[in-house]
Amino acid sequence: MTDDIIIIGAGFAARQLVKHLRRLDSRLSLRLIAADSCDEYHKPELSQVFSQRQRAEDLTRLPAQAFAESHNLMLHPHTPVTRIDRATQRVVTDAGTFTYRHLVLALGAEARIPPIPGRELMHTLNSQQEYRRAEAELQGAQRVLLLGGGLIGTELAMDLNRAGKQVMLVDRAAALLATLMPPEVSARLQHRLIGSGVQMYFNAEAAALARQDDQITATLADGRTLHADAVVCAIGLMPNIALAQGAGLQTRHGIVVDAHLATSDPAIFALGDCAEIQGRLWPYLQPAQLAAMTLAKNLTGARDSLRLPPMLIKVKTPDLPLHLAGEATAPDLHWVVEAGRDGLIACGRDDQQQLQAFVVSEGRMKEAFLLLKQLPDPMRHVCTM
């Protein structure tokens, strides 16, 4: 039997694709294969589980079998794919071999772990499954060392602190969220966190971890030592591309796709965190949602091209709520920051006074959507396959 569409992966992008496909065609034979439980959950909630006192199981919105039944879907949880045979259009797993007409790779990305001694002592929180493994130690920890001051690291630092834990944050950069906002905004966020008790170590990185009795000792590259009950690593993500590479598909940072979400094999498509869409990675929910809508149409006979508008990022830092968008690292950017009692607004403009990026906080967040309309097309400079 040949399936119309096989999807490898069960994250947000894969599920959105299933939902859009079923709206367009109720008769397609769909098969979803994934290494995890395939339960549906909302991944951004992982940044708030500690202050909300949530267990891993509390995150489940829809069990895997219920999702499969409601979408007339053949589902294979806990089934890693070992190989793709492009010549015969087959997917090989330990549970069997399946033949496809179209194959979709929604493989996601995995948390980056620095190759240092003691790295096995680190936890990551990139999935419900990872939180399930780390839950007991992290919920019981009083002192938590957090590696990484990017979006996820910053959100986790505030959440762990709000849960009453002693938080130590270590980052190689000179400031929090250094690639997403100007120093003035970052400084305000740092001030809030430090004021609530978070300890921060910038221009620093962990060189080694070691368990000593009932605690973990982290040695930084400059020789300083920190002591914690648990360590969380949030230094970034790496797209899962090994399966695609093994099949001979074109990859760079991610699995390379064109504007129609097709890979270098016209029968295979990719979307979500693993996909390099027209030269860039787009590791956010809105691009995955729009890609799923476009791909569903293309898999049912259309020939649509994906267009991504400027996207708003809502930073989950409730002690200083922030919305931001645009290309904050543009080389010719000039920032103007207006701060008041109701919040701040920071606008980054180029030499032609074109708005390229912005950050708004607290009471000024209502201005975000007006600013969003002024940003240029984020895909204007990307390359094609």
Image (cartoon, rainbow, N blue to C red):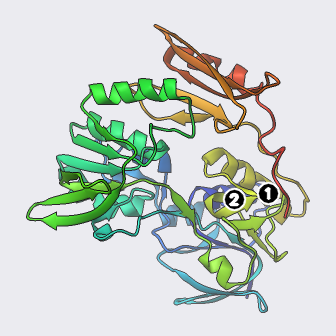
Binning the other alpha carbons within 10 Å of mark 1 as few (below 14), some (14 to 19) or many (20 upward) gives some
Label 2: element kind? helix
Tell me, yes or no, if residue 372 can be seen here. yes
**Residue 202 image point, x, y percent:** 38, 42
- Position of 222 relative to 33 (above/below): above
Q: Name the foreground residue: 111 vs 3.
A: 111
- Position of 368 relative to 197 (above/below): above
In this image, 28 relative to 76: left or right?
right
Quarter of the image where the N terminus is located: bottom right
Under mark 1, the amino acid is: Gln
- The residue shown at (75%, 67%) is 256
In this image, 133 relative to 44: left or right?
left
The label number, if any, that marks residue 105 in the structure image? none
Direction top: furthest residue = 341
**Which residue is identified by label 1?**
278
Q: Which one is earlier in the sequence, the residue at label 1 or at label 2?
A: 2
Under mark 2, the amino acid is: Leu
Mark 1–mark 2 distance (CA, rounded to whole Å)? 19 Å
**Residue 308 image point, x, y percent:** 77, 44
**Residues marked 1 and 2 touching at CB (< 8 Å):** no
Direction left: furthest residue = 213
Label 1: element kind? loop
**Residue 309 image point, x, y percent:** 77, 39
**Residue 158 image point, x, y percent:** 35, 36
**Which residue is identified by label 2?**
17
Binning the other alpha carbons within 10 Å of mark 2 as few (below 14), some (14 to 19) or many (20 upward) gives many
Q: Quadrant of residue 220?
A: bottom left
- The residue shown at (25%, 38%) is 163
Q: Name the foreground residue: 76 vs 230.
A: 230
